[in-house]
Amino acid sequence: MLEGKHIVLGITGSIAAYKSCILIRSLIKRGAEVQVVITPAGKEFITPLTLSTLTQKPVVSEFFDRRDGSWHSHVSLGQWADAMVIAPATASTIGKMAHGIADNMLVTTYLSMKAPVFVAPAMDLDMYAHPSTQENLQTLAARGNHIIEPRTGFLASTLEGKGRMEEPEVIADALDRFFNSTQDLKGKKILITAGPTYEKIDPVRFIGNYSSGKMGFALAEECALRGAEVELVCGPVSLKTHNSAIQRTDIESAREMYEAATVRFPNVDAAILCAAVADFTPSAVADEKIKRKGDQLTLTLNPTQDIAKALGAMKKKEQVLVGFALETTDEQKHAQEKLQKKNLDFIVLNSLNDQGAGFRHDTNKVSIIDQKGTVPFPLKAKEEVAKDIINRLVNELNAKE
């Protein structure tokens, strides 16, 4: 849990500030000591008296709030903390953090922070989607800050969309995972493929699939959290990475993913092939939009290059290669055949017949299959599934050392 951890909680001027009280209680119940730093605008939404009652500590807001010459030291707070959490984080505060505008105690504390920083955005959907906000969040993530994505839901504006601050228990869970994660992949380099591929038919059409990339991105974040340097090769997805240890390469087609994966594989300790790569691609791509003529359009498709088979042939004895199999019939049989043909160390099987598993879901239900047998797992959040898979990966890497 969070026993003995010192947490600086930054609160900004958002209606979601009321959730900070629940977050404080959750952190304290888990054993943490919490010090609140609040912006002047934040005090319009929740009072320092409420916050100090919950934390049993005076709330820090202004640089100078005494008449005896004393002042609050943002430097001391940065040295005291084991982590800083800014929840809710408004678009204004996120912008100031990204550009070093230290005009209040919260941002000054952030700039002095020696510990990891977690940012939980809260704002209206248009503000969250604005390019300036997204660029600022990307800047913070690139500097090693942990971004806790907001939810899609009902907002204070009465609109519905993405911008609702993540629930306090989920934020506390994120801290739990961070402090309790082992660094068992430190010094390792992991290649992960994720998302779909798009195979062009003409300038406006393509052959694709429903992969969202969520499982591959969860694996990348878990590996990075456990100390690995991650090479993430992903198809067209809307997801973002949050750990600076993840080096992302965006591709579109199966050929581009093949080229990116085969170039990187010789220099990694392991590869996890989670992408839903197209098995076929049009033999010819039209230069112009194909017009509607007659009752049928006939496409000739050629097989794409087999990434798993290519990496399996390249694999050195100390490397680990993990595959994925998404099946609809004879799941176990097809997964075991793929395990053998592609020279995989183990394969992760999921079935579209399992409710809540597969494409677009936030959950997954998998079985891990190797030469010795099958280990099934219950339906879980994809972040938890990623832990199970990476636990197995660590065992395989240790066995080869």
Image: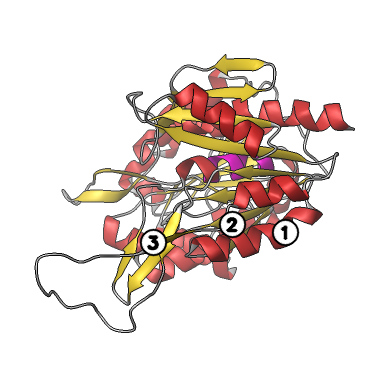
Q: Secondary structure at mark 2?
A: strand
Q: Nearer the viewer, residue 277 or 73?
A: 277
Q: Is residue 145 magenta?
A: no
Residue 15: image x %, image y %? 31, 45
Colour convention of the picture:
secondary structure
CA gap, disc 2 to disc 1? 10 Å
Name the amino acid type tagged 3.
Answer: Leu
Q: Is residue 159 left or right of residue 390?
A: left
Name the amino acid type tagged 1.
Answer: Arg
Q: Which residues are magenta?
A: 217-225
Residue 172: image x %, image y %? 52, 30
Q: Earlier in the sequence, mark 3 or mark 2?
A: 2
Q: Nearer the viewer, residue 111 or 140?
A: 140
Q: Which residue position holds label 2?
A: 233
Location of residue 316 with respect to 182 vertically, above or below: below
Q: Earlier in the sequence, mark 2 or mark 1?
A: 2
Q: Which residue position holds label 3?
A: 301
CA gap, disc 3 to disc 1? 28 Å
| Residue that lies at the very extreme toward the left in this rendered image | 294
CA gap, disc 3 to disc 2? 24 Å
The answer to whether the residues at label 2 and label 1 have Cβ atoms under 8 Å apart is yes
Residue 278: image x %, image y %? 45, 53
Instruction: Identify the residue shown where x is 62% and y is 20%.
Output: 31
Name the amino acid type tagged 2.
Answer: Val
Asked if residue 292 shows in the view, the reply is: yes
Q: Secondary structure at mark 3?
A: strand
Quadrant position of the C terminus in the picture: top right
Question: What number is the disc on residue 315?
Answer: none
Q: Secondary structure at mark 1?
A: helix
Q: Which residue position holds label 1?
A: 264
Q: Nearer the viewer, residue 143 or 310?
A: 310
Quadrant position of the N terminus in the picture: top right
